[in-house]
Amino acid sequence: MRVMPVIFVAALAACAPQGSEPAPGGGDGATASTQAGQPYDLRGQWSVARLNGQTLDTRIPFTASSDTFTWEPACAGQQIAYRTVDGRIEFYQPPREGDRIVCDIGYPEPLPRVIEGLEGRWDVEQKGNGNLVLTRGKTRLELEKAPAQPQVSLAGEWRVAGIDGREFNESYGLALSADESELWWEPRCAGVAVEYRIEGTRFSAHRPAVAPPPTAGSAEPPAAPAPAVCAIGLPERLQEVMAAIRAADRIERTRANGVLISGNGGSVTLFGQ
């Protein structure tokens, strides 16, 4: 890793929001809410997975001090300050003078856009899971608190309890099974399945890949035969449920200890069985 000086030009100081430097936040950082006019103290680990309503290819993690959000390592210089103004959170770039030594290191492509997107003053709503929903007019951004508990596991047996925010109240039940990387409807020969990945509260799913048939004269060994598919009637709303799961980008526990898989306008609620 090589170290190089970076000069922050005067234009940055001119564009930065004016005002006094933020006072250090008090408390132990256990809560992000402000009480009786006390400043927000966001100390801890946070991440941003969505920007302007779009899911980022890479989750952007930050470490927060009492007044600064920093993408690690700190020597990369990718950070933004915050303070409490009239009960709201304001993210801003404080004026900097002279040279600053930073390390020449690669960082995720969306990182500068996320830092720029954070700038400004936001209304704050704290969710039950500790996440902060920031709103400014029609703009909405969520800061996700690093979970204290292990991420949700889907391995096991599940029943569909809800879809798109409404109770799944059909004359038949809909059961799904899952291991650590795939979720499916029995019987497996029906071919109704999704492969998935969970990273914190981030969820991504896709159809299992099917190997193409070998070509004539190919030096590659023959692929394993495709799994047999049985002709069987499917429950009426099964494809609707699976489509919502494939489109989802978030997974979390519900207060009733179910699992909510949601995103892109749809959701599916599962309960263990």
Image (cartoon, rainbow, N blue to C red):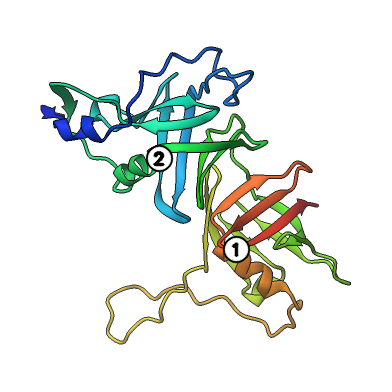
Amino acid at circle 1: Gly
Compared across the picture, whether 224 is left or right of 180 comes to: left
From the top left corner, tell me how far across and down residue 90 is, in percent.
44, 31
**Crowd around label 1: few <14 · some 14–19 · many ≥20 (10 Å):** few
Crowding near pointer 2: few (<14 within 10 Å), some, many (20+)? many
**Residue 243, image x, y percentages:** 61, 70
**Residue 108 position by quadrant:** top left
- Looking at the picture, how far across and down is residue 91, in whole percent? 40, 32
Please indicate, yes or no, whether residue 2 appears anywhere in the rendered image: no
Residue 118, labelled with which disc?
2
Q: Residue at x 16, y 23 (%)?
A: 100
Left or right: residue 135 compared with residue 165: left
Q: Is mark 1 on a helix, strand or loop?
A: loop
Residue at screen point 22% across, 32% down: 14
Q: Say which of 266 and 87 sits in front.
A: 87
Compare marks 1 and 2 and give the one earlier in the sequence.
Answer: 2
